[in-house]
Amino acid sequence: MIEFRNISKVYKMGEVEFVALQGVFITVRKGEFLSIMGPSGSGKSTLMNIIGCLDTPTAGFYYLEGENVAGLTFDQLSTIRNRKVGFVFQNFNLLPYATAYENIELPMLFNGKKGGERRQRVNELLEMVGLSPWARHRPTEMSGGQQQRVAIARALAMDPPIILADEPTGNLDSKSGHEIMEIFSQLWKGGRTILMVTHDPAIAAFSQRTIRLLDGAVQQDGAAT
Amino acid sequence: MIPAFFRNLFRDLLRQPLRTFLTLSGVTWGTFAVILLLAFGTGIGKQQMKQFRGLGQGIILVFPGQTTMTYNGLPKGRRIQVTPDELDRVRKRVPGVQALSPEFISSRNIRHGREQLLNTVRGVDVPFERIRNTIPAQGRFINETDVRQHRRNCFLGATIAKSLFKGIEPVGQRVMIEGVPFTVVGVMIEKTQNSNYNGMRDTHCAFIPWTTYMTLYGEKYVQNFIVQPSDPALSKQTIAALRNFFGGRLGFNPLDKDALFVWDFSDFERQFNLFFTAFNIFLGVIGSFTLLVGGVGVASIMLVVVEERIREIGIKLAVGAKRRAIMWQFFAEANCIILIGGAIGFLLAALLLTLLPAEQLEEYIGIPRLNPLVGIVTVLILLAIGTLSGLTPARRAAATDPIVALRK
């Protein structure tokens, strides 16, 4: 499903080069629940951005469902982000002036889905994350846990096979955090592939496999054990 | 998709109502200025044309000259001389001539008491009054009896009357023209005149019967004559008829333009129109610059908006927006401001033009008009400025790096 072959990412800041990833090999099969751990600056976020096609590697090959993503244009990557990957961020990244309903609808506005189809899908998702009564509320009127549930619903709008979550519980109290993790577990059992970055071993315990990164390289891969 | 696009567009515009309003007002003012300038330009042009025609709409001036072509064995370089009898025949025989007056012009010494001036004296016929609008303010113009009896009566322009009489009622007074006494029978109204020929403007002239002029100054041939055609639109045909008539009578080729030198005022009107078209383009350009300033305002505000909403752009790109979609969003927003601002400016200008006390202003600047051309030109300028001011911010927005944007 996801295959990294010798992926490197180097950021250039003027004269200084910063190596975020070097020679990473990872293979993720369909239906896995993978957590990525490691200290700050170890390359977790860069790894997630490349998997999610927000960023492109400096070197190496990345196959997503058998397709080499490295050579695609920005707009082609946009289509992949829209159809194949759902993002969940630590700080939710919801549009603050838009309602829960409109936030969930957003990905569907970028690929021309019909109005009726969109309405049905948004209502379905609101029900799934238990926020139907909150449809007309804005993120500022909601708790952190509720906001993250809106974000998850948005990630699922286009029914993507892969969910990428970057510290999804980082800004939540432990109770809300556990509720969010319950949703991820449900999604995993429903057959989705989930990749999650976390600091918290208790959260990582929900996953099936853990990869530890250090200084841009895989230090330990749970699949091996 | 489309309704959602517009719903979001208006919500984005209303998120900062004050700023949107201020940006809008720049465009509103620019549009207002363009429309008013063009409308007033059109009004002034029409009014000038009216004053111009007031001197005599579509009149034809004819000056006998010299032949430059041989004709029936006659050499070139002959003087063409027209007697008053020939003009009588013109009245009877040439079609399209409604009125006609011979004209004699020279500079003469005019005196009343101790006031002495060197001014233009014109010997003319009765129809001159109607052809050239030499309307009396007091008394009357030269009449048939004056002409028939070679009377020594004169009609004075307003300026010369003032200089000679210094407040004394001139009608009935006596003036000396080259030492010969004349009775003042009338004084002309003050009139604006924006063109002239041979000598001074009408307000500086003394008019006497052409018969008197001929006897006193020993003239045999008219210096020039004025024709008022029945239809100014057919002035070309009337001129051709005059050339044919005189060519036959006096022996010259009707195609010889210099035998009769003709000054056609309807031709002048065309040039006048051309000048005012240029004038309006000039006003339009000035107005467009005002509008351009409004457009620059929109562009710079939109750049700020893009900067402010960089995170929103990042989110949209992350969930699968193509660069084109982001570009359209900001392009549409800039254009929306411009079109709404333009529409308001348009309505305000139209309202002002309706409410304006046009009758009171008409004499000076005419009635400003909002014609369809003004509207079309304004809309085109607005569209051009909308495109220019929307493009840069839209491209800036579309070039956003989603990772950088999401980190903010």
Image (cartoon, rainbow, N blue to C red):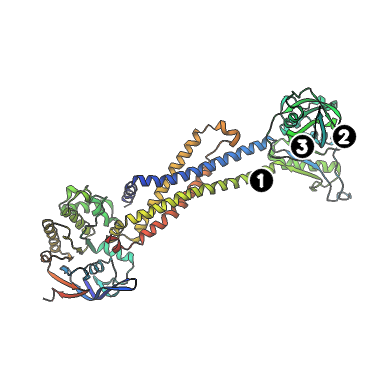
Q: Which chain contains the residue that carries disc 3?
A: B
Answer yes or no: do the residues labelled 1 and 2 have beta carbons within 8 Å? Answer: no
Q: For the residue carrying disc 1, how many other residues have a C-alpha within 10 Å: few (<14), some (14-19), or many (20+)? A: few
Q: For the residue carrying disc 2, how many other residues have a C-alpha within 10 Å: few (<14), some (14-19), or many (20+)? A: few
Q: In the image, what residue type sits under mark 2? A: Tyr
The numbered dot on residue B271 is: 1
**Residue A195 appears in view:** no
> Where in the figure is residue B135, as x and y percent of width and height?
71, 29
Q: Image quadrant of residue A214? A: bottom left
Q: In the image, what residue type sits under mark 1? A: Gln
**Mark pair 2, 3: CA separation:** 21 Å
**Residue B173 appears in view:** yes
Q: Which residue is under mark 3?
A: B226
> Where in the figure is residue B282, as x and y percent of width and height?
57, 48
**Mark pair 1, 2: CA separation:** 38 Å
Q: Image quadrant of residue A52? A: bottom left
Q: Does dot 2 land on a helix, a strand or a loop?
A: helix
Q: In the image, what residue type sits under mark 3? A: Ile
A196 relative to B284, above or below: below
Q: Which residue is under mark 2?
A: B217
Which badge, 3 or 1, comes first in the chain's sequence?
3
Q: Does dot 3 land on a helix, a strand or a loop?
A: strand
Q: Does dot 1 land on a helix, a strand or a loop?
A: helix
| Left/right of residue B339 with respect to residue B38 in the rendered view | left
Which badge, 1 or 2, comes first in the chain's sequence?
2
> Where in the figure is residue B139, as x and y percent of width and height?
74, 23
Q: Are marks 3 and 1 on the same chain?
A: yes
Q: Nearer the viewer, mark 1 or mark 2?
A: 2
Answer yes or no: do the residues labelled 3 and 1 have beta carbons within 8 Å? Answer: no
B352 relative to A70, above or below: above
B358 relative to B296, above or below: above
Q: Which chain contains the residue that carries disc 2?
A: B
